[in-house]
Image (cartoon, rainbow, N blue to C red):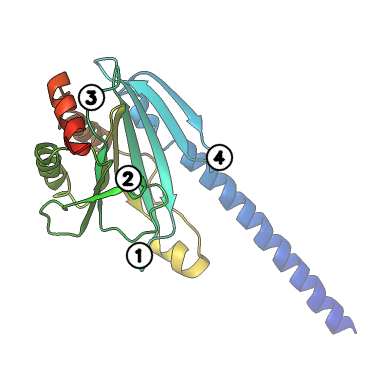
Amino acid sequence: MITDLALALFAAVAVATLAVVALRDQRRLAVQRRGLLDAAADILDSSRIRLSRDGFPMLDGNLSDGRRLRLELIADTLVCRRLPQLWLKLTLTEHSPQNRPSIGALSRPTGAEFYSLVHDLPEWGPPPQSETSILMRSDGTATAAEIDRSGSIFSALFRNPAVKEAVITARGVRLIRQAAEGDRGAHLLLRQVRFPLEQIPADLIRTAIAEARLLSEALPNRDVTTTEMNRSERMGA
């Protein structure tokens, strides 16, 4: 009787201790996440950081030319046979909508990329030359020249294995690249998603911004004549 009571008391204390430790770790992790984009705040003009629902920061700011840039962090635990990934997502908005197609490429596609814009584009395209598998799609309005030109840019970007997705649209461009990989011990033993970094390095952010600028300049604004010719071709004229 006394032994059973002692065991029950010991189990209760152990559970309470684990709960306190877990709560403390959760709070420490939340504090760590809030500062991940602090280095980016000094790179952009008029920057503002807020927290998303999952506790990761989101930063809005301006480039030197006045274009709006948003940086977000995506924790991806759906990767197959790999550790969790932390993706850095950049969305660069043009001053005004451009007369160009929507076209994008996704590196090493698995079908589980819930954050991908490429999966939402309706028309398959010829993948650019690359040492890794590439999924390329468009909205169906791109000319052969535009496909070739954007494919060359995608190939150049994907030479860096950290780049995951690149998309061009009329309103702007989207770039997703790896920021960090999950801690192996925390993931394998405790199934926790922890990323071993205090801040996203400023150099990585500058590199990603340069890549987004390159993507933005990939397709020139179409003139009216080209647009009318494309429309006639699609209508079978």
Discs 4, 1 touching: Cβ within 8 Å: no
Q: Nearer the viewer, residue 236 or 191?
A: 236
> Real-space Cα distance between discs 3 and 1?
39 Å
- Foreground mark, 2 or 4? 2
Q: Secondary structure at mark 2?
A: loop
Residue 227 versus residue 14: which sits nearer the camera? 227
- Distance Cα–Cα, label 2 vs label 4: 27 Å
User: Residue at image x 29%, y 21%?
Assistant: 97
- Amino acid type shown at disc 2: Leu
* First reached walking from the N terminus: tag 2 or tag 1: 1
Q: Is residue 129 left or right of residue 198?
A: left
Label 2 sits on residue: 121
Q: Residues within 10 Å of mark 4 (few under 14, many from 20)?
A: few
| Residue 163 visible, this orientation | no
* Camera-side residue of 151 and 234: 234
- Amino acid type of the residue tagged 4 in the rendering: Arg
Disc 4: which residue: 53
Give the image location of residue 143, x and y in percent.
Answer: 14, 38
Residue indicated by mark 1 = 82
Q: Residue 167, relative to residue 15: is it above or below?
A: above
Q: Earlier in the sequence, mark 2 or mark 4?
A: 4
Q: Quick one: SS at disc 1?
A: loop
Seen at 48% across and 69% down, the residue is 189
Quick one: label 1, few (<14), some, or many (20+) residues within 10 Å? few
For badge 1, the amino acid type reads: Arg
Residue in the picture at 69% in, 61% down: 17
Q: Secondary structure at mark 3?
A: loop
For marks 4 and 3, give the CA distance: 34 Å
Q: Tell me where residue 98 appears, x and y as whole percent.
A: 25, 23
Q: Residues within 10 Å of mark 2 (few under 14, many from 20)?
A: some
Quadrant where the image shows the N terminus: bottom right
To which residue does mark 3 refer?
A: 99
